[in-house]
């Protein structure tokens, strides 16, 4: 049995700083009038904008209001890039005060662009544990966006009950991942 042609995967272009800038401009221009929006970069988007990587396979975005995404399919196709909508809290428990730690990038028209809370991004990268993720986590620390003592305090403050949403995680395993990483910084 063959998949329908509409299901065929199309290898899109890597996301570069130039393509990311175009996406930010275009998404901001298409945002509904009379409203203000916040869009957060996560993962590769943060790495590209911070100059840690020249490109990424996709750009991950977290939004507070889906209405800002009304042209996302068109933009994805026009720019020939992969765009994923993802919150780090889909993979790791929320850290106290995360919304207050988003790092402002810039405002374009009606959209304020941010890097998603660096502490939550680092926690998600440490839990996943891939080499590229660990390298990104080191850059967050080296650039002063994450203090390891603060990260450890935030992780310790996550209530045990919060881990019920994450059957593959345990508080102990998360703490060990953070401690192991801290010992290398």
Image (cartoon, grey):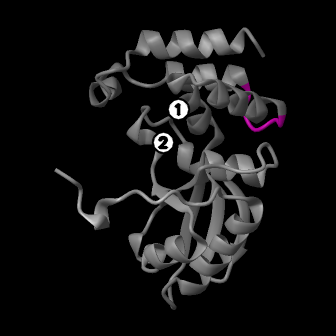
Residue 103 location (% of width, % of height): 69, 52
Q: How many marks?
A: 2
Q: Read off the magenta span.
A: 143-147
Pointers 2 and 1 in contact (C-beta within 8 Å) = yes
Residue at image point 60% right, 75% down: 111
Residue at image point 65% right, 71% down: 24
Q: Name the quadrant containing residue 182.
A: top right
Q: Residues within 10 Å of mark 1 (few under 14, many from 20)?
A: many
The answer to which of 87 and 159 lies nearer the viewer is: 87
Q: Secondary structure at mark 2?
A: helix
Q: Is residue 39 left or right of residue 148?
A: left
State which quarter of the image contains the C terminus: top right
The residue beneath circle 2 is: 88
Q: Give whichever of discs 2 and 1 has the lower sequence position.
A: 2
Residue 36 location (% of width, % of height): 54, 78
Residue at image point 61% right, 60% down: 13
Residue 105 visible within the image: yes
Q: Is residue 17 left or right of residue 42?
A: right
The residue beneath circle 1 is: 124
The numbered mark at residue 8 is none
Residue 124 location (% of width, % of height): 53, 32
- Please, what is the dominant secondary structure of the magenta stretch? loop
Q: Residue furthest front?
A: 1
Residue 65 location (% of width, % of height): 42, 69
The answer to which of 112 and 70 lies nearer the viewer is: 70
Q: Name the quadrant containing residue 49.
A: bottom right
> Magenta stretch: residue 30 in it?
no
Residue at image point 51% right, 18% down: 156
| Distance Cα–Cα, label 2 vs label 1 | 6 Å
């Amino acid at each position: 049995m063959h998949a329908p042609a509409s299901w065929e995967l199309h290898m899109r272009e890597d996301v570069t700083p130039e393509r990311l800038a175009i996406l930010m401009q275009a998404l901001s221009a298409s945002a509904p009038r009379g409203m203000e929006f916040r869009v957060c970069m996560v993962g590769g988007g943060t790495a590209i904008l911070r100059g840690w990587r020249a490109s990424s396979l996709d750009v991950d975005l977290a939004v507070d209001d889906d209405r800002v995404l009304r042209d996302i399919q068109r933009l994805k196709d026009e720019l020939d890039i992969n765009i994923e909508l993802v919150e780090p809290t889909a993979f790791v428990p929320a850290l106290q005060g995360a919304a207050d730690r988003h790092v402002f990038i810039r405002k374009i028209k009606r959209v304020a662009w941010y890097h998603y809370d660096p502490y939550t991004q680092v926690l998600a990268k440490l839990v996943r544990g891939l080499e590229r993720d660990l390298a990104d986590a080191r850059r967050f620390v080296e650039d002063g966006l994450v203090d390891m003592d603060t990260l450890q305090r935030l992780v310790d403050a996550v209530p045990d009950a919060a881990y019920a949403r994450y059957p593959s995680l345990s508080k102990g395993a998360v703490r060990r991942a953070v401690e192991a990483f801290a010992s290398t910084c």
